[in-house]
Amino acid sequence: MARTAEFEFVEYRKEEMIHASTQLIHNYARYSDLQGTGQWTRVLLNLAAIIRNSRTEGIKWATPGLNITFSGIPQNTPGLEDGRIIYSADEPHFILDQNVPVPVRPVLRTHIERVTEAIVDEMRDVYKLEPRKKDSLLYLNFPRRLYAERVEVVRAEIIVAPSPKP
């Protein structure tokens, strides 16, 4: 039974996250030539507000052949590690999903894959986002060690008291 709990509080470098996020969407809107991406920059103010206010709701951009989702700033969730309850959150991230249930011509599919590869390379090399594949999705994480301005861990003892008698 867990006797201690840890609560992790992360304050991110929000302006850096906004800059990197804006660049990701801007790159798709400007260079991909995908249908509908020209309108994507209109939602960047919503994205900036989500990050600036540490909101948990995400935001999604969609076009035939590609969906991009931003996770929002994830909330802490409990987990058990070495007999301790730990409340921590996943890193904020984008999900690039090319498995959209819309028929896409093979030449367009190849174009989307090439554009995505080039943009992901830039996001990794310039903005230090960490790409990782999970199932058929590509995640671009904001690594905590690079984007956290401050991480505070608060430890607490768990006191188990008998319940009062009715």
Image (cartoon, rainbow, N blue to C red):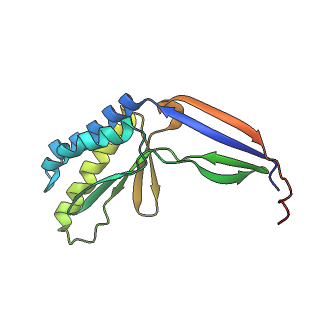
Q: Position of residue 59 (x, y in %)?
A: 32, 52
Position of residue 8 relative to residue 82, above or below, is above
Residue 119 is left or right of residue 75, and the answer is left
Of residues 1 and 39, which is closer to you in this image? 1
Q: Residue at x 64, y 47 (%)?
A: 87
Residue 162 is left or right of residue 18, and the answer is right
Q: Residue at x 83, y 59 (%)?
A: 164
Of residues 153 and 119, which is closer to you in this image? 153
Quadrant assignment for the C terminus: bottom right
Q: Residue at x 58, y 37 (%)?
A: 9
Q: Is residue 8 visible?
A: yes
Q: Position of residue 104 (x, y in %)?
A: 19, 68
Name the residue at the front extreme. 166
Position of residue 147 relative to residue 86, above or below, is above
Which image quadrant is residue 61 in? bottom left
Q: Is residue 122 visible?
A: no
Q: Position of residue 91 (x, y in %)?
A: 50, 44
Quadrant assignment for the N terminus: bottom right
How many numbered markers are drawn?
A: 0
Q: Residue at x 45, y 55 (%)?
A: 133
Q: Position of residue 17 (x, y in %)?
A: 38, 34
